[in-house]
Amino acid sequence: MCRSSGNGYVACNVLRPATGGSATGSKVRCPKGWLVTVDTSTPVHRIVVVVPAHDEQDLLDACLTALATAERRVVEVAPVTVSTIVVLDACTDGSARIAARHPSVSVVPVAHRNVGAARAAGFAQDLNGGLSHADTWYATTDADSTVGEQWLVGHLRHAAEGARAVVGTVSVRFEDRIVDDEALRSSYDAQYVNESGHPHVHGANLGVRATDYWAVGGFAPLATGEDHDLVRRLELGGTVCRRVCDIPVDTSGRLRGRAPDGMAGFLRSLEPSA
């Protein structure tokens, strides 16, 4: 979908090169023929998606199926390649078997039992490839989450508009819970800021230019809060981190997650007995 501001075309979910442009920008055309000038000084041609997983056999297939759809959508509208890496962290269940059902996915087995170290291990695979990172965008989500079909298109659009990092929102699947607690749902809705410029940081919906990622040392080996830590270091280093709400990721409403104080911990804090 494209939006017009009245005096110019300001946003488009489809990125295709068009004639025109300048030394610092280029025109991008959407199916309706509208044009938007974007920063293409270093266009993104590669996307690397990392998914850490620790015993997620029940949710991993839905995660990877959604990512496959998002990959198809973005390669339809932009000249990019997408690589998805699943980091199986000390898995003792059938997560490896689930990942094997998706032949385009690369699997990295580790035994860190640490989400920060697992994410870092995934992106380290790209570093080991010895490729130039100037045209590479890193994105990460979680094994208990499902991205929307326009998720990667959205990340690419924000990158084209000048964002060096994208910090997205999540939508909690409360139906994952055995008992649908209306009080918890209401408390969450009241406290969660679902608008541009929001204060949240979620490893389930995060993207960054590879050059900026490596400039600050990547994910730290933190058992929880590795996403907040990375964004903090990016911002301290001057990276433009765009906090957006237009590409939300659905995530599990479980109260016992893999990270001690991750999304599940936040939800537990909202319970009346907390």
Image (tube, helix red, strand yellow):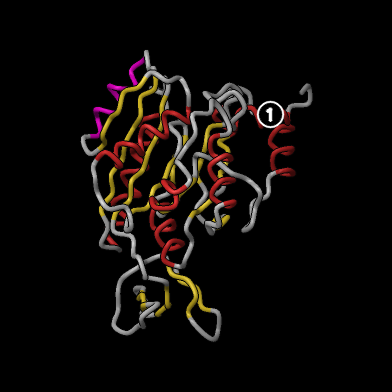
Q: Is residue 115 above or below residue 235?
A: above
Name the spot of residue 120 as percent of width and height, x first: 41, 34
Q: Is residue 96 magenta?
A: yes
Q: Is residue 192 magenta?
A: no
Is 256 placed left or right of 14 in the picture? Answer: right
In the image shown, does 203 or 252 lie closer to the viewer?
203
The residue labelled by disc 1 is 181
Quadrant for the N terminus, please.
bottom left
Quadrant for the C terminus, please.
top right
Type of the residue with mark 1: Asp
Which residue lies at the image location 26% right of the left edge and 36% below the top edge?
Answer: 105
Name the spot of residue 167 as percent of width and height, x first: 54, 50
Name the spot of residue 189 as percent of width and height, x first: 70, 43
Name the spot of residue 173 as percent of width and height, x first: 55, 36
Q: Residues within 10 Å of mark 1 (few under 14, many from 20)?
A: few
Say what secondary structure mark 1 lies in: loop
Q: Which residues are magenta?
A: 93-102
Which residue lies at the image location 73% right of the left edge and 39% below the top edge?
Answer: 186
Is 29 placed left or right of 232 in the picture? Answer: left
